Image (tube, rainbow, N blue to C red):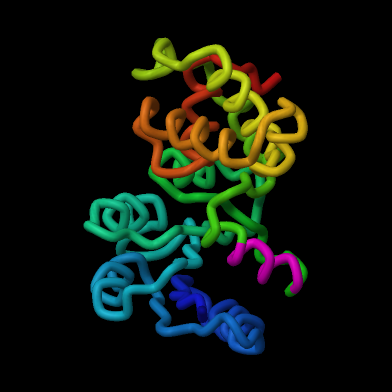
């Protein structure tokens, strides 16, 4: 299966570079480009990509607002934020808005390709240490996130391991259970937290105080 990708960035050079890297892969293809956030939604509706590479700072509509609008669609794509600075608070806001991960514009081509495929698959957390660092820059949340108190003990164990970026296979090895069991637990965690994916579950874990980023 070929993954369909949309690139949203206000810099022509960045869009061109990303397109060249992505189109060089046999199982990836760029189906559209947008120079500002306002153009992303109609483009996604028309092309129905699997992944959107989203610059966090754009004219007309920034990447945070564009992400929120995309994820309100019936069948939203995965959003992968592309940024210049990893300690940018806008990146964390985009993750809170529903982005599945982020990467730096100086990322090596091989790592970019891996990131796109990882986000599309949704099994592992992209750059868990960087997300933890971003969460640690924020003050503690106002209270418990809805659903945290409904997690079973084992689901809590799984969520803690998810914050470390472990895959289903790695979690299964850590807890000495089958991957199918882990997959069930992960699904239950996402459902109880109302999270779209692992990244959103991890953000909820940090913001509720269930796991400390420090």
Q: In this view, does 10 lie above or below 102?
A: below
75 relative position to 174: left or right: left
Q: Is residue 164 visible?
A: yes
Q: Position of residue 195 (x, y in %)?
A: 40, 36
Q: Which of 10 and 172 is in front in this view?
A: 172
In this rendering, the answer to whether 194 lies above or below 60 is above
Q: Does residue 168 appear to the left or right of 109 in the view shown?
A: left
- Tell me the residue at 70%/33% (across/down): 164
Is residue 13 something one can see in this rendering? no
Question: Between 121 and 199, which is closer to the camera in this rendering?
Answer: 121
Which residue: 55% across, 25% down? 138
Figure quadrant of residue 177: top right
Locate residue 31 relative to residue 138 in the image: left or right.
left
- Quarter of the image for residue 60 reads bottom left
x then y, percent, for residue 135: 59, 29
Instruction: Check if residue 61 falls in the magenta segment.
Output: no
Tally of numbered tags: 0
State the residue at coordinates (69%, 46%).
127
Q: Quadrant of the C terminus?
A: top right
- Magenta residues, as a range? 110-117
Query: Measured along the vertical axis of the image, is residue 192 above or below residue 50?
Result: above
In terms of depth relative to the viewer, which is nearer, 93 or 6?
A: 6
């Amino acid at each position: 299966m070929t993954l369909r990708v949309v690139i949203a960035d206000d810099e022509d050079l960045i869009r061109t570079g990303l397109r060249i890297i992505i189109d060089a892969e046999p199982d990836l293809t760029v189906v559209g480009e947008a120079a500002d956030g306002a153009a992303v939604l109609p483009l996604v509706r028309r092309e129905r990509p699997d992944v959107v590479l989203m610059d966090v700072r754009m004219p007309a509509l920034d990447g945070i607002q564009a992400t929120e609008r995309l994820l309100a669609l019936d069948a939203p794509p995965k959003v992968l934020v592309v940024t210049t600075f990893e300690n940018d608070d806008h990146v964390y806001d985009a993750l809170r808005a529903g982005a599945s991960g982020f990467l730096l514009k100086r990322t090596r081509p091989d790592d970019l390709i891996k990131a796109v495929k990882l986000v599309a698959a949704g099994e592992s957390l992209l750059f868990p240490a960087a997300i933890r660092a971003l969460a640690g820059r924020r003050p503690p949340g106002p209270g418990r996130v809805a659903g945290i108190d409904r997690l079973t003990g084992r689901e809590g164990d799984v969520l803690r391991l998810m914050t470390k970026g472990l895959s289903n296979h790695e979690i299964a090895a850590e807890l000495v259970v089958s991957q199918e069991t882990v997959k069930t637990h992960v699904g239950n965690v996402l459902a109880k937290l109302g999270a779209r994916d692992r990244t959103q579950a991890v953000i909820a874990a940090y913001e509720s105080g269930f796991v400390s980023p420090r």
